[in-house]
Image (tube, helix red, strand yellow):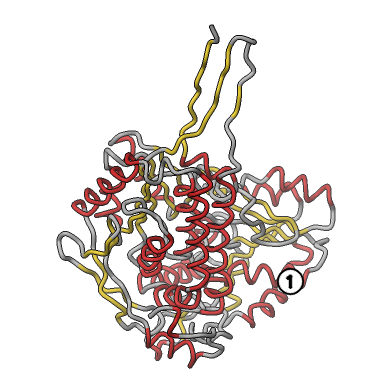
Amino acid sequence: MNQSTYSTTPTDQAGWQALADQLTLEGRAYVDGAYQWASNNETFACISPVDGRELAQIASCDQADAELAVAAARKAFESGAWSHLAPTKRKAVLLRFADLIDAHGDELALLETLDMGKPIGHARAVDVPATVRAIRWTAEAIDKVYGELAATPHDQIGMISREPIGVVAAIVPWNFPMIMASWKIAPALAAGNSVILKPSEKSPLTAIRLAALAEEAGIPNGVFNVLPGYGHTVGKALALHMDVDCLVFTGSTNVAKQLMIYAGQSNMKRVWLEAGGKSPNIVFADAPDLKKAAAEAASAIAFNQGEVCTAGSRLLVEESIRTEFLGLIREALTTWRPGHPLDPATTCGAIVDQAQLDRIIEYIGIGKSEGATLVEGGKRVMEETGGLFVQPTVFDGVNNRMRIASEEIFGPVLSVIGFNTAEEAITIANDSIYGLAAAVWTSNINTAHKVAKALKAGSVWINHYDGGDMTAPFGGFKQSGNGRDKSLHAFDKYTEIKATWLVIE
């Protein structure tokens, strides 16, 4: 299916289903400008969590495919067809790429929904525009990133310049397949690198489709490659490859640690990691609008079915308003009910696969066994559809010693923890191996800045949750990772800094 087969965005479930019925899904890898099956001819089934049906057979790439893709990427890089292109020309190609993604927005949103279960309304209104923005913003920035001159004696010139690093392997997660891919590939490509994108085996469809759009936009053969497959096969092969210069990853902390080991075992390739989170959302009694705070706290745990690295999974509430605020949370969650993902009115879609659903259900059981009080949700629903759905779940009476408060669940499970003072809130919030994001709700400007400054997190939001845009860097402290996506800081991951010193005779 292409854009010419439909003219307007569907407005109801029937319309989206009709569009889905027109789809012809591509399951092959994309290497050196062509779609091809894995060298071993192996495939795996892409199963939709919406209804349990098979969407397509996907190429299961491994070591041999990694060798082909890296060789193609290296050849393209050394040829200079992209790496030596003027930044303004790379910008123009990437802007065309963004325009094509925008033009195919309905199709790409539908692929995201069918593949990983998110509501179509969110896929169309959030995932597609955010992907387009990431590529456009980065493209527009690349011809405005200047080198530097050092402070030197009058007879010397010290030049500091950036050069593309070479071959970049990007391993991205399944929860926001296109957005996370765009955060990696946009600055990597803009800087002049060749890229190999390895999507999650749980959500490979949009990455595979993007390859054709990249070709149409004018990205040369070998510069952008897509290798679907498993982490322990093709992902490991890329991480250990001696000719991959840079490895970027978003996913779990355990996998992130393993990738660091692989880099050390191979060529000391640059490794940049965005890993897990257990983000604290701190609500003081003097929050400017408790109802708004509750609405955003509900969204912070229920949006994208809680499958969000920055999910506000620890809700810290001042004891004097705890009972009142818990009531507001439960009220706010009435607008976050599981429904069919192709219904534009749905706010909570399907969990990505059976393994993840089982994990969420297991943690709900752990919360009960640890002594927390289940006050909302906690059950699998809509089983008759064949899909994978679970209610947003709230536990009260939680403390940081409980596993539901210390371990990343990656599902719509909220732990409510009480506190009495700002110092206590800071201690609880920072008592975590993670440091990805946090939020503070208060009308007191001193409290806001005091707490925000003390929180060990890469992003801190005041009187809202999950703010920022492409101008703000994104990444974590502690075991939430290193490096930053978005903003001009992202270019640090994909360039080498060279000092060139000239003595004037």
Q: In this orientation, does residue 373 appear?
A: no
In the rendered image of this protein, does residue 161 appear above or below residue 333? above
Q: Residue at x 72, y 62 (%)?
A: 464
The residue that appears at 57% across and 70% down in the rendered structure is: 126
Q: Nearer the viewer, residue 7 or 410?
A: 7
Residue 393 placement (x, y as % from top left) = 55, 74
- The residue nearer to you, when weighing 18 against 145, is 145
Q: Position of residue 337 (x, y in %)?
A: 57, 82
Which residue is depicted at the point 30% across and 56% down? 231
Can see residue 447?
A: yes
Foreground of the two, 357 or 8: 8
Q: Is residue 433 left or right of residue 210?
A: right
Q: Residue placed farthest to the bottom in the image?
A: 14
Quarter-of-image position of residue 52: bottom left
| 7 left or right, relative to 316 | left
Q: Residues within 10 Å of mark 1 (few under 14, many from 20)?
A: few
Q: Residue furthest top?
A: 505
Where 196 sits versus 155, above or below?
A: below
Q: Secondary structure at mark 1?
A: helix
Across the whole image, how many numbered discs are drawn on residues? 1
Which residue of the protein is positioned furthest toward the left in this rendering?
40
Which residue type does callout 1 highlight?
Answer: Thr
Q: Is residue 70 left or right of residue 128?
A: left
| Residue placed under numbered mark 1 in the picture | 323
